[in-house]
Amino acid sequence: MEFKTPQINLYVENLEVSREFYERLGFKLTFTAEIGGKAVHHEFLLDGFNLGIALKESVRDVHGITPGKNSGCEIVLWTEDTDSAVQFLLENGATLLSKPHHFLDDRLRSAWVQDPDGNPIQIVCKRG
């Protein structure tokens, strides 16, 4: 048995709002699934990382799964400047969860935001 091409799927309320949000971060749309002519799932790629977003209603209707609020995982995005990246995200629909701060003996600078559906995203950069 071999597993390959891992991907994280996020369940969202508004597919287009989430699509636009992740595209502004540089994710490139690679696939769209439609049911009855309506987009219900998008897949993206950023620097080798696969991300899917799927409508919560579609997951319920098609698969019988009732997604809940998930705070047990996060997307991590490395950048050259945490503060500038957080400002960009806030200007493009994210909500601040944790202000930029140094940690790990000041080797890293990190902050957390959440996407339009409340999924946490860590923004982190190496210092010096």
Image (cartoon, rainbow, N blue to C red):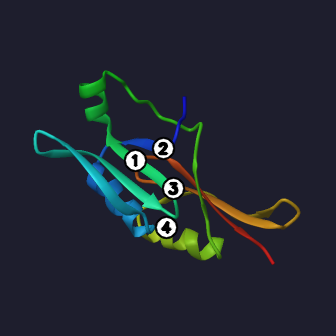
Q: Is residue 123 left or right of residue 68?
A: right
Q: Secondary structure at mark 1?
A: strand
Which quarter of the rendering shows the N terminus? Answer: top right
Q: Position of residue 113 (x, y in %)?
A: 55, 57
Q: Residues within 10 Å of mark 4 (few under 14, many from 20)?
A: many
Q: Secondary structure at mark 4?
A: helix
Which residue is the site of mark 1? 52
Which residue is the site of mark 3? 49
Q: Residues within 10 Å of mark 2 (few under 14, many from 20)?
A: few
Which residue is the site of mark 2? 8
Q: CA distance from mark 3 to mark 4?
A: 19 Å
Which quarter of the rendering shows the C terminus? Answer: bottom right
Residue at the outermost left position: 36
Q: Secondary structure at mark 2?
A: strand
For residue 99, say whether it is visible. no
Q: CA distance from mark 4 to mark 2?
A: 20 Å
Mark 3 is on which residue type? Phe
Q: Earlier in the sequence, mark 4 or mark 2?
A: 2
Q: Position of residue 115 (x, y in %)?
A: 46, 54
Q: Position of residue 79 (x, y in %)?
A: 62, 70
Numbered tag placed on residue 89 in the rendering: 4
| Closer to viewer: mark 1 or mark 4 | 1
Mark 4 is on which residue type? Leu
For the residues bearing labels 3 and 4, Cβ distance under 8 angstroms: no
For the residues bearing labels 2 and 3, Cβ distance under 8 angstroms: no
| Closer to viewer: mark 4 or mark 2 | 2
Q: Secondary structure at mark 3?
A: strand
For the residues bearing labels 2 and 1, Cβ distance under 8 angstroms: yes
Q: Residues within 10 Å of mark 1 (few under 14, many from 20)?
A: some
Q: CA distance from mark 2 to mark 3?
A: 9 Å
Query: Residue 80 lies in what quarter of the image?
Result: bottom right
